[in-house]
């Protein structure tokens, strides 16, 4: 009989990176438990993490490459699949030019190393067309914060904050460990403010909950700015020495009176604004403000995020203990080729219309991609190599996504399962899971670096991300960019300048602490300590002005504030459910049993108007289509009247069939997935 053994590594069922103990019996994973010694999750796991073995052992997991034929998919050997794919890529690049091929990385492999491999590969073969789930995730927060503070990884220092503001984020569902951090902070007396359109789980813990209409956070933030300025609750020394644009912001914020903010947000601003401002003043500078995905899917997201980041500058919480802290990175080598082989002259797709997105993220625009595939304009894109993404469920306007991806000359999908997107592919390649690869993962807030373990080798014809991009680059004459024989060699190279070794990391399976926290680093960094164009915190941005945008974080009311008689409701999507990560997990019994069906949250007053009872099926129609879905009636105050919420990720009731792919935040190009005008009818 085999003895049970435990291997420590990190969970990647979502991107939260909890420490896990993987229990093995021989070469079988029998269970996964939380790593009690891990600084982040301290032994806890969410339901997804503790069922990682179910995904790993799933009978539905792909183990062989599939090729589409006239009779559907057939299994073919890996080497043949790679040869044929490389040949097709060569043909397409010869016929249409190098940029006719793109790569698309999804949330399934997270960010950092695996993302950088995809970026490296596409540049190595001469195309600038890198796409990812980032076009609808987190990039707009990066840009909004980056425009004000500089594009670095500022994070709320939750463990040391005296006041925490969770704004458009619900950690119990999306970041369970953050909830524990918040609980610990509250136990030592920190205050908690939550601002959301829904009375969420985190709102239930809050000292102060403020409910706003979708897409109106910018108005509230500017109202708070006005209040802070009017009361002199500011860090004048910091403003004087380290910021630009204060007078212009002060002048602009004057319009954000209680009346105006109340009208826009729907909250009682005369009550909410002074209370929030006073809480901020009482904890200054130990105020940790977190903005979530709730800000991102609106036409005014970046400017709303900028307005919130301005508060950090006004109260001098930037890089302060308990404020908006800037942790040090581990100093890994750069895998991407943007410096070595910049390809902007090849017109990365969407960079002309959304140059800020490209400047900050070196990322193309997935909604433009769908139109480009279908129209051939501004130039043909005929092949997409996709890994760890399922945009046939997760991108807006999924009917168009399916049409576009299905019409490519070559679609290759690397996944663990035959997803809705994989079903459109010419080749489906089975991918290694997080338990079958080894990568360097940073928990910046704790300054730890972890080398994740290859708990088991992948099955014979299943490749990790590195091996795939390596083999493909070598077949396409770009092997020089992928000189490392395997992931271990790559990891060693990544560490070369960091002063760390693989061996050191191997000896610290729950993470190696590479640095100690240090605050106010800007004091030591001369005249231009922040990475903005001016080197200071930018309340106004000349850079944005240069592209024709407003220099101020202006608030433009969302269109949904004036209801369209044909589409009188505002659809918010994507509120996370703890058992699923986007379209993932729905095929795993333990997770799907925890929540068996999607539903639409509807305010009880609206339900009464429409004559709808709990569980009734309604038709929800936007200007691009309809879906049918059962209703959950939210009691008064749980959701704002006139607003409905549907979570994405379901195959048969896919809300992204009705989200819009042609209405964008003008700065970052994000689609409106949280302010979609819809009509609701009882079926
Ligand atoms: N279980 C699980 N965890 C996940 C994911 C998952 O799919 N499942 N996805 C991961 C990913 S990729 C991401 S990006 C993060 C996202 O993580 P979060 O940002 O934490 O997303 P949510 O927890 O859904 O919180 C979004 C909140 O915004 C609110 N909201 C919507 N519109 C508005 C608005 O206009 N203003 C305000 N103030 N609030 C608004 C919603 O009601 C919701 O409560 O979660 C990550 N974690
Ligand atoms: N309406 C609406 N839509 C949204 C959102 C919203 O709030 N509302 N949120 C958006 C956000 S924030 C995001 S991040 C996107 C996410 O969108 P996607 O990137 O499409 O994310 P997933 O649906 O999780 O798809 C990940 C895929 O990776 C596969 N996978 C898992 N592990 C591995 C691995 O190790 N290797 C490989 N190769 N594949 C793996 C999974 O099986 C799954 O099919 O969705 C967006 N879509
Ligand atoms: S939050 Fe859950 S799914 Fe995400 S890493 Fe932690 S245990 Fe895994
Ligand atoms: Mo995301």
Image: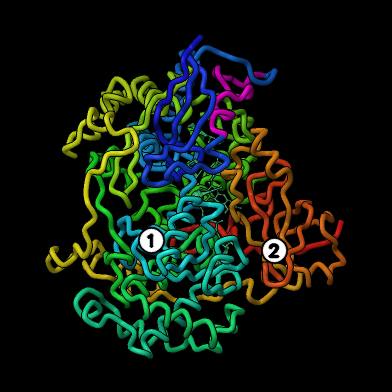
Q: Give the image location of residue 217, x and y in percent.
A: 51, 72
Q: Which mark is residue 158?
A: 1
Residue linked to disc 2: 644
Q: Is residue 681 left or right of residue 166?
A: right
The one of 624 and 557 positioned closer to us in this rendering = 557
Q: Which mark is residue 461?
A: none
Q: Is residue 17 above or below residue 71?
A: below
**Which secondary structure, mark 1?**
helix
Residue shown at 47% from the left, 60% from the top: 183
The one of 653 and 386 positioned closer to us in this rendering = 653
Task: Residue 320: tell me if it is visible.
Answer: yes
Q: Is residue 584 above or below residue 492?
A: below
Mark pair 1, 2: CA separation: 31 Å
Q: Quadrant of residue 214?
A: bottom right
Residue shown at 43% from the left, 42% from the top: 17
In the rendered image, residue 233 lying in the magenta stretch gets the answer: no
Q: Which label's residue is closer to the chain start, 1 or 2?
A: 1
Residue shown at 58% from the left, 41% from the top: 47
Q: Give the image location of residue 312, x and y in percent.
A: 34, 71
Decide: few, some or many residues near mark 2? Use Cα within 10 Å; few <14, some 14-19, many ≥20.
Answer: many
Q: Is residue 159 above or below residue 418?
A: below
Image quadrant where one finds the C terminus = bottom right
Which segment is the magenta one? 51-69
**Which secondary structure, mark 2?**
strand
Task: Residue 86: tell me if it is visible.
Answer: no
In the rendered image, residue 57 lying in the magenta stretch gets the answer: yes
Q: Is residue 604 left or right of residue 77?
A: right
């Amino acid at each position: 009989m085999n003895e049970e053994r435990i291997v420590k590594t990190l969970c990647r069922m979502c991107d939260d990176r909890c420490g896990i103990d993987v229990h093995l019996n021989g070469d079988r994973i029998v269970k996964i438990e939380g790593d009690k010694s891990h600084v982040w999750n301290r032994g806890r796991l969410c339901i997804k993490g503790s069922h990682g073995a179910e995904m790993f052992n799933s009978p539905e997991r792909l183990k062989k490459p599939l090729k589409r034929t006239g009779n559907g998919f057939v299994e073919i050997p890996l080497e043949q699949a790679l040869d044929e794919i490389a040949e097709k890529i060569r043909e397409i690049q010869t016929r249409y030019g190098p940029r006719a091929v793109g790569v698309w990385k999804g949330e399934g492999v997270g960010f950092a190393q695996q993302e950088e491999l995809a970026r490296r590969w596409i540049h190595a073969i001469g195309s600038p067309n890198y796409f990812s789930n980032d076009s609808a995730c987190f990039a707009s927060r990066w840009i909004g914060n980056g425009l004000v503070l500089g594009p670095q990884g500022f994070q709320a220092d939750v463990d040391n904050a005296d006041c925490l503001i969770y704004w458009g984020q619900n950690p119990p569902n999306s970041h369970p460990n953050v909830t524990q951090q918040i609980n610990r902070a509250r136990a030592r007396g920190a205050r908690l403010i939550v601002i959301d359109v829904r009375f969420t789980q985190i709102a239930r813990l809050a000292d102060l909950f403020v409910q706003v209409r979708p897409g109106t956070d910018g108005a509230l933030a500017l109202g708070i700015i006005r209040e802070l300025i009017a009361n002199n609750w500011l860090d004048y020394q910091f403003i004087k020495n380290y910021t630009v644009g204060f007078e212009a912001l002060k002048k602009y914020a004057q319009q954000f009176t209680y009346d105006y903010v109340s009208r826009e947000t729907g909250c009682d601003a005369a009550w909410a604004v002074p209370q929030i401002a006073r809480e901020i003043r009482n904890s200054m500078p130990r105020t940790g403000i977190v903005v979530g995905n709730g800000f991102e899917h609106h036409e005014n997201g970046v400017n709303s995020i900028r307005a919130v980041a301005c508060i950090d500058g006004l109260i001098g919480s930037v890089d302060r203990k308990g404020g908006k802290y800037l942790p040090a990175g581990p100093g890994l080598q750069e895998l991407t080729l943007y410096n070595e082989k910049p390809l902007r002259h090849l017109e990365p797709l969407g960079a002309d219309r959304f140059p800020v997105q490209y400047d900050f993220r070196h990322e193309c625009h997935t909604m433009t991609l769908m139109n480009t595939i279908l129209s051939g304009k501004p130039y043909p894109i005929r092949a997409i190599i996709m890994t760890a993404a399922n945009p046939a469920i997760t991108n807006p306007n999924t009917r168009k996504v399916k049409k576009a991806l299905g019409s490519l000359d070559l679609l290759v999908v690397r996944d663990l399962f035959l997803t809705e997107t994989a079903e459109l592919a010419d080749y489906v390649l089975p991918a290694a899971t997080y338990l079958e690869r080894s990568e360097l993962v940073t928990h910046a807030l704790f300054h730890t670096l972890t080398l994740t373990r290859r708990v088991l080798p992948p099955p014979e014809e299943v490749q990790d991300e590195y091996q795939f991009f390596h083999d493909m680059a070598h077949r396409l004459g770009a092997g020089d960019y992928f000189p490392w024989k395997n992931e271990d060699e790559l990891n060693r190279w990544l560490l070369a300048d960091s002063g760390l070794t693989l061996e050191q990391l191997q000896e610290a399976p729950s993470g190696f602490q590479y640095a100690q926290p240090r605050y106010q680093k800007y004091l030591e960094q001369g005249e231009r300590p922040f990475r903005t164009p001016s080197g200071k915190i930018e309340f106004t941005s000349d850079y944005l002005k240069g592209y024709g945008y407003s220099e101020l974080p202006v608030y433009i009311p969302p269109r949904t504030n004036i209801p369209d008689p044909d589409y009188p409701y505002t659809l918010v999507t994507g509120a996370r459910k703890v058992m699923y990560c986007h379209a993932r997990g729905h095929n795993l019994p333990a997770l799907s049993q925890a929540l068996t069906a999607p539903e639409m949250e509807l305010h009880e007053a609206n339900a009464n108007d429409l004559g709808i009872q709990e569980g009734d099926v309604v038709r929800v129609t936007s200007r691009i289509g309809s879906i049918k879905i059962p209703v959950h009636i939210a009691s008064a105050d749980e959701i704002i009247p006139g607003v409905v919420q549907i979570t994405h990720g379901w195959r048969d009731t896919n809300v992204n069939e009705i989200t819009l792919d042609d209405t964008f935040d003008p700065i970052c190009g994000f689609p409106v997935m949280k302010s979609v005008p819809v009509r609701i009818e009882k079926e």
